[in-house]
Amino acid sequence: MSDNGLFGPDSVTWRVHADPILWVAGLRALFLQAVHPAAMAGVLQHSDFRADPWGRLRRTADYVGVITFGTTAEVERMGARVRGIHAKVRGTDQATGLSYRADDPELLRWVHCCEVESFLSTYQRATGGLTPEQVDGYYGEQTRAAAVVGLDPAQVPASAEAMRSYFRDMRGQTAVDRRARRVASYVLLPPMPRWATWSPARPAWAGVAGLAAALLPAWTRRLYGLPTPPGSAAAATAAVRALNAAMRAAPDRYREGPHLRAARERLAPAQVAPAQVAVSPAG
C-alpha cells in the first residue's frame, strides 16, 4: 500500500509546499520568528546559525521536506530527533532574565505559526491560487505537523481567523532588539564562499532576502524600522509574483526539491504489463 505520510498528494499542504516560492517564505518566517525575544535567545545561545547559516537553512529545509513529503516512518524519526534536541535546549534570556525551554508549548507554537503563516501568505501573494476554504484547510492540515514536535493540535490555530487572532494576541510580546537585528543581518548578508564574494550570487541573495522582509506584516516591518510607504505591500506582491513566474519556468530539476521527487516516485502507480489474453478460435 502507498504511504502518503502526514498529508498526501491531494492535500493543500502538498500544493503549497511544492511551490518553489517556499524558499522566500522560509526567509520571511525567520524574520518573523526573530521578533520574539525568547526565540532569539534560544537561537543565539544554542544554535550554530551564525557560524554555519547555510547548514542551518539546509537542515530546516530538510525538516520541512520530510514532514511534508516523507513516509510515516520518516516523519516519526524526524519528529523524535527534533523533540530530543528541543528537550536539551534551555537557558536564561540575558536581556529579560526570563528562563526558556525550546520544548515550551508557547515557544513551539510561536515558531510553528510563524512558519505556516509565512508559507501560506507568501504562496497566496505569489499565486492567489487558494480559496478561503482551502486556506482554512491548509491551517487545519498543519495541526498535524504541530503534533510532530509535541504540540497539542487543539491548541494550534486551525483557520485563517484563528491565525490572525493569534498574532494579534502575540504582538504585545514582540520586540526587535540588537539580537533580532543581528539575526536579520545574517539572513540578508550571510557569509558566502570566496568565489561568490564578487559574483552575482551575493546581490541575488540580498534581493531575495530583501523581498522576504518586504512581505512581512506591516507591524513587523515597523518593529524592524523598515519603511512602509503607501503601496509598498502591493509592490512586494507584484515582485513576488514576478519571481515566482520566473522560478516556475525553470526545469523541474531546479525548482523541485529532493523530498518531493522521492514522494512522487514512491507514490507513482506500478507499471503493470497488460495481461496476455488467450482467445480460442471460433468453433
Image: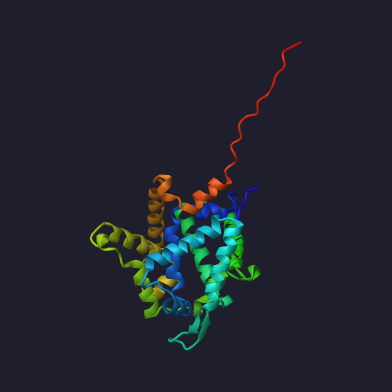
Can I make out residue 156 in this image? yes
Indicate whether 101 appears above or below 20: below
Q: How is the image coloured?
A: rainbow
| Quadrant where the image shows the C terminus | top right
User: Which residue: 38% across, 53% down?
Assistant: 243
Residue 220 in picture, x, y percent from top left = 43, 72
Image quarter for residue 219? bottom left
Q: Is residue 237 above or below residue 56?
A: above
In the depicted view, which residue is nearer to us: 10 or 76?
Answer: 76
Is 27 on the left-hand or right-hand side of 103?
Answer: left
Q: Is residue 128 above or below residue 104?
A: above
Seen at 58% across and 37% down, the residue is 271
Q: Residue furthest right?
A: 283
Say which of 164 and 141 sits in front.
141
- Residue that appears at 37% across and 58% down: 235
* Of the pair 163 and 219, the residue shown nearer to us: 163
Return the residue found at the far left: 198
